[in-house]
Image (tube, rainbow, N blue to C red):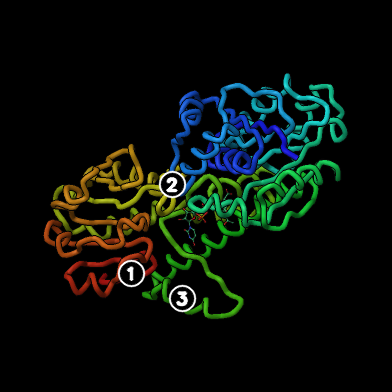
Amino acid sequence: MKKKICILGLGYIGLPTAAMFATHGHPITGVDVNPEVVQALNQGKIIIEEPYLDIMVQAAVTSGNLTASTEPTEADVFIIAVPTPMNQDKTANLTYVKEAAQSMLPYLRKGNIVVLESTSPPGTVEEVLVPILAESGLAIGEELLVAHSPERVLPGKILMELVQNNRIVGGINQQSCEAVRDLYRTFVKGEIFLTDATTAEMCKLMENTFRDVNIALANELAKICEEMNINAWEVIQLANKHPRVNLHQPGPGVGGHCLAIDPWFIIEKQPQLAQMITLGRNINDSMPKHVLKRTKEIIRNIDGKKKVVVLGVTYKPDIDDMRESPLLQFVSLLEQEEDIEVVVIDPHVKECPHLEKDIWKAFNNSHLVIVGVHHRAFAHLDFNQMKAVMKVPNILDTRNYWDEEELSQLGFHYYLLGKKNGE
Ligand code: SAJ
């Protein structure tokens, strides 16, 4: 049965979800507080970068099933997909969730369903959302069904993963679980597992914490290997030949709105007990400073001002998302160094500090090129030309992206995070 759905928050999750429901025949009102997003959407356009999303949104808007507004409207289902940013003290800022819930109060009717998709500290649905919704006067769990169904999609593969991934639905009661499961069945081909709301919240946080802690382990290995003259990348490759080992990749840090933030939502609830989680976060947060240390070592013998080119500032490859990007932090550390001139190249980014559009202008007279993000656009550069225009042909690869042997043969000094070579 077609349900009228109101989706609050048209960002990286809300918009694809809206387009997905709309192209499966549900009439959707997408709500966003940003008039720019609303205006663009009503013209069938989007202002974020995600493969195929533009095509799908255009199809949904053209079909008449997707419209946008700055205000909620009456509907059968309300899905909250607003950001849950982190406060200065690393606790969850639930302001947008609360505002979204409050904004829908006048429109709630008997028989409605409310789903929280935003990532939240365990207990948010029961302790924060439900009390607000209760102001509607509806009997919660009977006249108004409520559940948490966290998104799990990977930026860059959102549309495919929305459909294929298994999904968790954590309802405040069985009736809520089942209603929300039936709703997502519209397009979810993966399995849908039912549980309670707080367990679902913890699952979502632990999925990303698992990854964050494992990346911290890889980053710690990288630092250890640099001290011991071992190549961490080779260790990882060989160790992963073991059938039950899956070491992650080191890098300049962990970014994005998920891994860099979600573990803190567990720490917030149990700071004394969440020891490994806290340590993992701190190790990953230390990586920009570590890359700065390596940078300074590489250029320490060069006199005068050193031109350092950073390739990539998004939080991961081939997307435009710079949220919590460790590379942005790294760039701001570099700019505090008086003898360094920093230049940033990122074909996915329209605006950021020190951005240069022309890669050859950036390379010209530079003393060090740093691979920060392994965008596909950086895979096959003209390295001969690069060597010719650089003042000193130093490369620091934080992703093991380029070929050490090839570049060394071309005459570059090639340095790798996780391996201290040539020093
Ligand atoms: N990274 C490493 N080493 C690795 C893997 C990743 O340094 O071995 C870094 C990346 O460079 C990036 C960060 O980690 O800065 C996060 O990237 P990611 O691709 O691991 O994850 P996200 O944040 O884009 O998406 C994650 C996914 N979660 C998991 O894989 C457990 C996704 O499925 C979630 O939906 C998403 O978080 C979310 O919204 O929570």
Locate the C terminus by quadrant.
bottom left
Q: Are marks 3 and 1 in contact (CB under 8 Å)?
A: no
Q: Nearer the observer, disc 2 or disc 1?
A: 2
In the figure, is residue 116 to the left or right of 401? right
User: Within 10 angstroms of label 2, few (less than 14), some, or many (20 or more) residues?
Assistant: many
In the figure, is residue 155 to the left or right of 227? right
Which residue extends farthest top? 106
User: Within 10 angstroms of label 1, few (less than 14), some, or many (20 or more) residues?
Assistant: some
- Which residue is nearer to you in this view: 267 or 259? 259
Q: Position of residue 328 (x, y in %)?
A: 38, 44
Q: Label 2 is placed on what type of residue?
A: Ser
Q: Residue at label 1?
A: 420
Which structural element holds mark 2? loop
Which structural element holds mark 1? loop
Q: Is residue 155 visible?
A: yes
> First in sequence: mark 2 or mark 1?
2
Q: Label 1 is placed on what type of residue?
A: Lys
- Which residue is nearer to you in this view: 94 or 56? 56
Kindly report the distance in space between the C-alpha atoms of the residues bearing marks 2 and 1: 25 Å
Image point (63%, 33%), residue name? 28
Q: Which mark, residue 406?
A: none
Q: Label 3 is placed on what type of residue?
A: Gln
Q: Position of residue 227 (x, y in %)?
A: 39, 70
In the figure, is residue 342 to the left or right of 40? left
Ligand 1 closer than 8 Å to the CB at disc 2?
Answer: yes
Q: Residue at label 3?
A: 237
Kindly report the distance in space between the C-alpha atoms of the residues bearing marks 3 and 1: 18 Å
Q: Residue at label 2?
A: 325
Q: Position of residue 286 (x, y in %)?
A: 45, 53
